[in-house]
Image: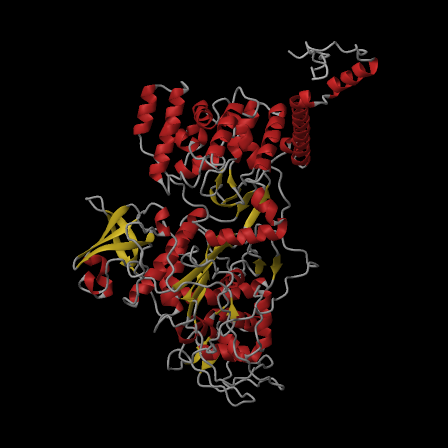
Amino acid sequence: MQTLFPTEPETPETREDPGTAPPEPRPGPGPRHYLRRFLEFFSLHGPQFRSRRIARRAGFLALLGLSAMVGVMLGLSVVYSVDLPQMDDLARYHPNTTTELLDIHGKVFGSFALERRVVVPYSDFPKQFRDAVISIEDKGFERNWGVNLVRAVEAAYKDIHTKGRAQGASTITMQLARNLFLSAEKTYGRKLQEIFLSVQIERRFTKQQIFALYANQIYLGHGTYGFEAAAEFYFSKHIRDLNLQESALLAALPKGPEYYSPLRSPERAMRRRNLVLNEMLEDGKITLFEANSAKAAPLGLHIETPANTVAPYFVEEVRRQLEKEYGADLVHGAGLRVYTTLDLDLQTVANNAILGGTAAYERRHGWKSRLQNIVLSGVDMRTYRHPDWNQAPEPGAYSHALVVEVTPKRVTLKLGPKPAVLTPEDWTWTQYKTADEFLRTGDIAYVRVEGTLPDGNIHVSLQQDTGAQAAMMAMDNSNGEVLAMVGGRDFALSQFNRATQAQRQVGSSFKPYVYTAAVEAGAKPTDTIVDAPVSFPTPNGPYTPHNYEPDYKGTMSLLAAFEESRNIPALKLAARVGITKVIEVAHRFGITSNIPAFLPIAIGSADITLAEQVGAYSVFPNDGIRIEPHYIRKVVQADGQPLGDKLPEVREVIAVDTARTMMTFLQGVVQHGTAAVASSLKHPLGGKTGTTNDYTDAWFIGFSPSVTCGTWIGFDDRQSLGEKETGAKAALPMWMEFMKAAIADKPNEYFPTANAPKKQLDVPLTPANAEPTPPAKPKASDDSDADADPDPTDSDAPKPAPKAAPAQATPPSSLTQDAPATPDSTPRAPVPIVRQAPRATTPARPAPAPVVRRPASPPTGTN
């Protein structure tokens, strides 16, 4: 045992020797000796204290390390908490919500959003659903303070032993903090921030508030955010209406929305759903019978029809206008309710008419398709899935199908999850007797759903899509509201809107502006003009136009010339009143395209959009009033407050008498002229056909007293539609199909007579001092096709001589004169007609929009 003051050790000098005399006694240790020993003991100096010195140094270093660690932790706490959002920000937080578009009947038909979300209160989440989420995501949600330390320690242990960070320990509150304010990166720094935020959230908000925030914020796959939007997407139900197995499936998704997606991986989704049910059973939330019954049930998906599929081109026009007026952030994230002018019922009819009309055109020209074959491309037929199959096939729908088996008299196809069948009657129009002559396994065929066979297979008929496109637009005459719009056969394949963006030659549908200028100059329908060969002098030589038919009618009334779409009379009228006057009239009618002042413009060599034509033609049944076509009635914010209303431009562009005189011409086309087949509708109608060079464009623009509608058909690359594919044959049937529905509930309407009071419209005139919209300059064309001159063999758009010069004359004293007009004294050299090419690349064989009905084939007439 070591004492405080150890004795002096023995040495040879101090040890007694028995054979010698004892040494002289020495004096004992003095005070200085004891002081030195005392200092050595407390300072741990000396060889006997070596172990204590080591322990002291180790303790000092340990304390120093612990102090450093505490300092680092305090520093990290400051660093990671200094930029954290304040809880006041969360109290004011409004998540991005979906902007909805409603038609005139209040039906939602489209939406757009940065995040597809529908925010609902806590009370809308049923207890069974809350139990499912809590059982699988955070069993201690009601008891913990935002952090589960036990799970955190377990996760950290597994992370260390698995050399990764795959094990999570997030509570519902921590998930909320991460989703609202933090990134998804897996770092310990982010986890520390998550913990700090969770503690603050728990201190500020109740458990109900936290759950509601979480349930409305979490991402659940396929662009849906929040459980209400997910319930609507996966089951076409509200969250409050879900049953046990549906609630469990949604509760299973937060862990991995894409990995456990019931659309992409139904087996994984089923296993995960059943795990949720087991957890609920273990927690005593459900009985064993309920758990087993729910586990035995199928997934039960009922996928909601994708947004914007009924009127995608209309939705896109609305989006552009809203973003221009209010900005993209407000439009896509503020949950606006946009009350549009669309009539959803008429839009469906328009879709059907366009698809049916183009299908009828394709069949008229026989089988030409070169089908894509996925087998030759190396794609596995068992895993192939076409985008058209996202929607259930319904009778009347056009869709793409995969050919899986071909025999001479029967073809089996894959159309989504169900097989489909073609029989010889379904491909008779192709002129092939057996299917194996033109189809093979792996082909992607274009079909129309006809119904269901007794054996459960889908019965389809073979169709064709060689790239022909069509467009339609209709508006309400009384207020300018656009009721329907179709910009092409398939928005998914081509977003180029052929109703508003495509500038195409209009053929004889331009002639109403010529005749309007003549009527303003004093012409009457009963005046006569000579339809005979004529040449117009130009600086480059004579211009000699021709009619569509190789004949001339001689002296005829202006009314008859208009009804039969004779070209020579139209050119004579344009020359006499002046082509610049005709162009000025067209601009008054709302044509914003720049039109060169050359005489061939009178017979349709101008490039104009369908939307411009429809807006212009509505002037005639409106007694000379032009109302700017528009798409939006009003916009309401999420809190119910309206955004500013914008009234359409309304102007009187021609006199009432002029408008009613022109109505005589336009009604005559339907009653006796090139569109006489439309008289079968037994309703007051007017309009004008149009066909262009080499049958590249076919038009019909017409109206009833209440609705103006225009149709166009052609190819984006301006190839010919084929011989005799005139406006009356190719475009008019689609117009008739639509107008049957548009006038169905208006049996007693009529056009005003000559002495009737002026028509009353639903919108006020724009003040006279307001500036009208100036004509737009033509947009640059990227079309290399230089053959844009009208065809001399076409009644709607004859082809002028290559060196035609402008012709303008003073108003004639008599319209019965047969002499050619005197051209301008300073004629200008002609310029080539520039075509507007499509602004979006369109595949050669686009697919039609899904879920439509095939219209009955209307009779056709001659142009």
Residue 152, relative to residue 645: is it above or below? above
Q: Is residue 426 above or below residue 5?
A: below
Residue 111 coordinates in the image, percent (x, y):
50, 45
In the image, what residue occupies the spot 48% across and 59% down?
497
Look at the image and name its color scheme.
secondary structure
Residue furthest toward the left? 408
Farthest residue in the front direction?
19
Residue nearest the observer in this picture, 236 or 551? 236
Q: Please tell me whether residue 110 is drawn above or below residue 774 in the rendered image.
A: above
Callout count: 0
Q: Quadrant of the C terminus?
A: bottom left
Instruction: Residue at the far right: name it.
Output: 31
Residue at left offset 34%, top offset 67%: 861
Can residue 692 be spotted in the picture?
Answer: yes
Is 781 left or right of 566, judged from the image as shown? right
Asked if residue 27 is positioned above or below residue 353 in the image, the reply reads: above
Q: Is residue 598 left or right of residue 28?
A: left
Q: Residue at the spot x=40%, y=58% of the render?
A: 489
